[in-house]
Image: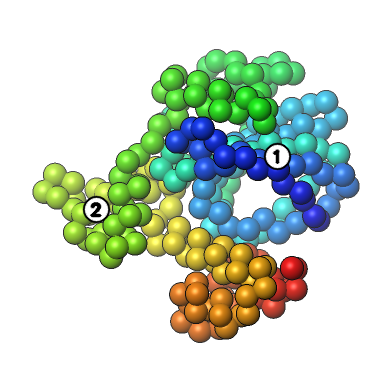
């Protein structure tokens, strides 16, 4: 299936991106691995649902209903709901119960379904209510990992094990898994832009072409040649 996504940046420091799309016919597609969790609002046949979709550690086939509209709010790494561990959402999703045709239940309160235009207001309210928080350790770990200094970030009060525990609590994934997923996404983007397979191996930091192939099959659900043919 082919989806045409409309995306926009968010004013919130908690949000990675806000997107919307729609389907015409029922079908299936390959859902790529992703390190971020998101809120997805689905509208079909006049009915609305809100689903929390967790990080996905592998590519999987996914069904798509006909004549449906979708809104997505994808959150930055380190953003999470304290009452709902991200680890419980990894390779999983949960749909929140409806309160009315225009609202759903969250933390014992009824909330209006957000839309593409007021998604930032919706997120701001989640933050004010304490239902959405950020773990600053995540940004620190990702920065220090890029600089090769993760082990040096530990202090007497905050051991490396404690840092890793906070990181997984906030993201649901280890920093190594996130790095693998994002490298595969980078390689797929390069191939879709017309970069050769060998150049993608080099620019994305893979050891060789078989290494790239294994990674893309696991995280993207296609071989490098299949990704290249999509452009």
Task: Where is residue 229? Give x, y as percent.
Answer: 75, 73
The quarter of the picture where the C terminus appears is bottom right
Q: Position of residue 72 (x, y in %)?
A: 64, 38
Question: Gap in Å between the C-alphas at discs 2 and 1?
Answer: 39 Å
The quarter holding residue 132 reads top left
Q: Secondary structure at mark 1?
A: strand
Q: Can residue 52 be seen at all in this image of the molecule?
A: no
- Whole-percent x, y for residue 15 in the image: 51, 38
Residue drawn at x 44%, y 62% as measured from the top left: 179
Identity of the residue drawn at 70% across and 39% down? 20
Asked if residue 200 is positioned above or below residue 126 in the image, the reply reads below
- Indicate which disc, 2 or 1, sits on the residue closer to the N terminus: 1
Position of residue 11 in the picture relative to residue 1 (left or right): left
Determine the residue positioned at 45% across, 25% down: 127
Q: Quadrant of the N terminus?
A: bottom right
In the image, which disc is placed on residue 20?
1
Residue picked out by circle 2: 161
Q: Assess disc 1: are there few (<14), some (14-19) or many (≥20) residues with their C-alpha within 10 Å of its C-alpha.
A: many
Q: Position of residue 109 (x, y in %)?
A: 55, 15
Foreground: 91 or 78?
78
């Amino acid at each position: 299936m082919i989806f045409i996504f409309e995306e926009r940046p968010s004013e919130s420091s908690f949000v990675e991106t806000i997107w919307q799309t729609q389907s015409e016919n029922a079908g299936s597609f390959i859902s790529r691995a992703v390190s971020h969790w998101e809120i997805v609002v689905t509208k079909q046949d006049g009915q609305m649902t809100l689903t929390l979709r967790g990080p996905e550690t592998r590519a999987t086939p996914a069904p798509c209903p006909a004549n449906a509209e979708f809104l997505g709010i994808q959150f930055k790494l380190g953003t999470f709901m304290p009452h709902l561990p991200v680890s419980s959402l990894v390779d999983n999703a949960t749909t929140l119960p409806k309160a009315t045709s225009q609202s759903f239940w969250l933390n014992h309160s009824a909330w209006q379904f957000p839309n593409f235009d007021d998604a930032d207001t919706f997120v701001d309210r989640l933050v004010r209510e304490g239902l959405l928080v950020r773990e600053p350790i995540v940004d620190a770990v990702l920065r220090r990992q890029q600089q090769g200094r993760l082990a040096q970030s530990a202090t007497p009060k905050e051991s490396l094990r404690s840092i890793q525990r906070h990181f997984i609590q906030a993201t649901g994934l280890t920093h190594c898994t996130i790095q693998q997923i994002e490298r595969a996404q980078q390689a797929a983007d390069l191939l879709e832009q017309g970069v050769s397979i060998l150049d993608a191996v080099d620019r994305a930091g893979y050891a060789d072409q078989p290494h790239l192939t294994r990674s893309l099959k696991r995280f993207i659900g296609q071989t490098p040649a299949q990704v290249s043919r999509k452009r």
